[in-house]
Image (cartoon, rainbow, N blue to C red):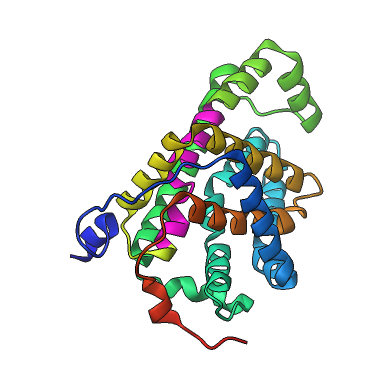
Amino acid sequence: MSNFHVIAGAGERSVELAVRRIGYADLTDALRRGLDDFMTKPSHYVFLCLIYPLVGVVLAAWTSGHNALPMLFPLMSGFALIGPLAGVGLYEISRRRELGMDMSWKHALEVRHAPSIPSIVAMGIYLLCLFVAWLLVAKAIYVWQFGDQVPASIGSFFRDLFTTHQGWMVIVWGNIAGFVFAVIVLATTVIAFPLLLDRDAGAYEAVTTSFRAVTANPGPMAVWGLIVAAALVVGSIPVFAGLAVVVPILGHATWHLYRKVVEPSSVPIRRARSKMPRK
């Protein structure tokens, strides 16, 4: 029943995990611990995350033509929607450090041995579908106001965007739509991927646990979402290069946030399967 395993986990039925209430101080502590994970061997983590800023640069270059120019911002902002998937390797490194295991950068690929890898893949597809849906919605909003006309130049595009009624309608409705997508991702995946790495769980269990974590801690989780959004914006300013530092810190911090929100398992499932000698 491997297909059912993707939904419900190894037990072939959903098990409701205990979710704790956290405070704002827990967010600070999670970030501090994430920074500590990053500082332990920063060269390994920066190497692991170089793909993130590189892809950002490629996206910017791809949309430099006038035809695709209206999709530049949706691509840049929507790329953050798949951030939880991009951090899977970082969650694994933090998990290994927590267990006192070898945490060389190559072990970020150990996620392929996670018992819930089918669920991780399913969640990845889910995020990619949301990403595509966001691009379609953003494109529809632009066409709604400007039609199918191609911007004459980069200058005219930004002038129309910021000095016309149609442009401000695109900005307002685009931000509203983007906010809705961001809330969906936060509510359904804030701790989903760390949970799937830690336990032999199903996608349904991971999504519902994330949702319960958000509803149990609406204030702290809203602030967490703002922290992630602000950090990604700051990291994107220097030609996306800052993401090579911002993303790993946020990734590690997300693992520690998961540890604070979800009650620990009585049986460390993956330790027995992936135990390695300490260095």
Image x and y of residue 159, in percent: 78, 21
Name which quarter of the figure residue 34 lies in.
Answer: bottom right
| Residue displayed at 20% across by 55% down | 13
Q: Is residue 200 visible?
A: yes
Query: Between residues 140 and 36, which one lies in front from this camera angle?
Result: 36
On screen, residue 201 above or below 163? below
| Residue displayed at 66% across by 47% down | 28
| Residue displayed at 58% across by 64% down | 90
- Is residue 266 shown in magenta? no
Horizontal relation, residue 210 to residue 203: left or right: right
Q: Quadrant of the N terminus?
A: bottom left
Query: Between residues 18 and 199, which one lies in front from this camera angle?
Result: 18
Query: Between residues 148 and 226, which one lies in front from this camera angle?
Result: 226
Horizontal relation, residue 58 to residue 218: left or right: right
Image x and y of residue 243, in percent: 71, 53
Seen as rendered, the residue at the extreme top is 165
| Start-end of magenta stretch | 177-196
**SS majority, magenta:** helix
Query: Between residues 175 and 272, which one lies in front from this camera angle?
Result: 272
